[in-house]
Amino acid sequence: MCARLCLPRSTWTEFCTVSTRKHLNMKALLLPHIVNLADNARPLELVTLPDPVPRENEILVRVSACGVCHTELDEIEGRTPPPQLPIVLGHQVVGRVVDVGVFVTRFHGGERVGVAWIHSTCGQCAYCLNGRENLCENFRATGRDVPGGYAEYLTVAEDFAYRLPDVFSDVEAAPLLCAGAIGYRSLVLTGLRDGQSLGLTGFGASAHLVLQMAQRRYPQTPVYVFARSESERQFARELGAVWAGPTEAEAPLKLDAIIDTTPAWTPTVEALKNLVPGGRLVINAIRKEDGDKAALTRLDYARDLWLEKEIKSVANVTRHDVSEFLLIAAEIPLKPQVQTYALADANQALWELKQRQVHGAKVLNID
């Protein structure tokens, strides 16, 4: 029976077909175990799984697009391992509601929604009650603690899903749900004032959105970009960076704030020397890789940390971050640069991400 939803006649047949798939199987990509991508370039296995069924407060989403994030590499290689394996990865999810639990009131069949990294929190601790649910001890992440969007369907509690602005296509909206939202939180945490200078080290999915946000939010603020490849630096200049140089370069002037979007230690160390006294470095990577950990031995206290320089990390996002950012992104409007892949080609997208072959954001086009 499909009686729980009130759908227009034109969508009724499609909805009944989808919602009765509970006894069928969906396509999904599973991570069966932790691996080093250097040893296994195809860590995800394409399988069929039973269609998920929404609980009383959940919606069932038919996935149309899912962003590919560096955090997936951290999950695959064990830097932020899923608590249970196998697991379906993916936390930048766009799709349409096809079924709802009996207590759901916010969403109806056919609505387009987004699902982000924040899947659920306890809602009762001091952090949750004070608007810092991203720090909740019981924070659960989409695609790590629960199945994510590298699949044809997923379920999510209605309070942790988002309506998406019409200005964005499905593949454009997907990277906004993590790369964009975490970039927005990072920009806010810089404490930047209009006219002060901003640096971005690393220029991938998140940074290319931060640059566009900064131009609108702080129109008098010049943006300087540090990136490993000349193609990334050229891309930054095309988007409006006043200067772009290698990771180890010194900017033409000392900067008031820098956002580090990389998974490596070298950009962190190099960024500190480019800060003004009292400047702030904001690191939005969920983990740092150990490959260049020796870079930390190059830290010079007098040059890099003295004179009240600050380092602040970004931990997850709140629902408020995502909701507020989506409104801002639509108003600008942001224009994510997107490379698309079929679901079956997710391993290729992840390998390219590992090799830093990045030009904007990578998105699986699942529909």
Image (cartoon, rainbow, N blue to C red):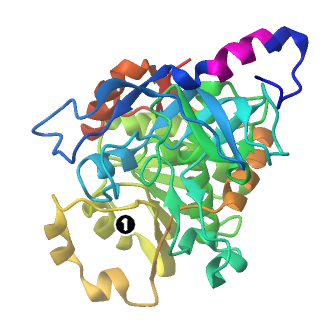
Which residue shows up at 23% across the image and 78% down it?
Answer: 299
Q: Position of residue 358 (x, y in %)?
A: 37, 34
> What residue span does the magenta drawing correspond to?
13-20
Vertical relation: 347 (above or below) 87: above
Q: Residue at x 23, y 50 (%)?
A: 77
Residue 15 shown in magenta: yes
Asked whether 188 or 57 is in front, the reply is 57
Residue 170 placement: quadrant: top right
| Left or right of 62, for residue 179 | left
Q: Is residue 366 magenta?
A: no
User: In this view of the protein, can residue 248 be seen by the observer?
Assistant: yes
Residue drawn at the location 79% of the way across and 28% of the way down: 109
Category of crowding for the residue at label 1, using alpha-carbon neighbours closer than 10 angstroms: few (below 14), some (14–19), many (at least 20): many
Residue nearest the viewer, comparing 195 with 344: 344
Under circle 1, the secondary element is helix
Q: What amino acid does circle 1 point to?
A: Ala
Q: Which residue is mark 1?
A: 271
At 31% from the left and 43% from the top, the residue drawn is: 86
Percent across and percent down for residue 76 are 27, 46
- Location of residue 332 (image quadrant): top right
Q: Is residue 172 left or right of residue 165?
A: left
**Residue 105 at x, y percent in the picture:** 85, 45
Q: Nearer the viewer, residue 172 or 53?
A: 53
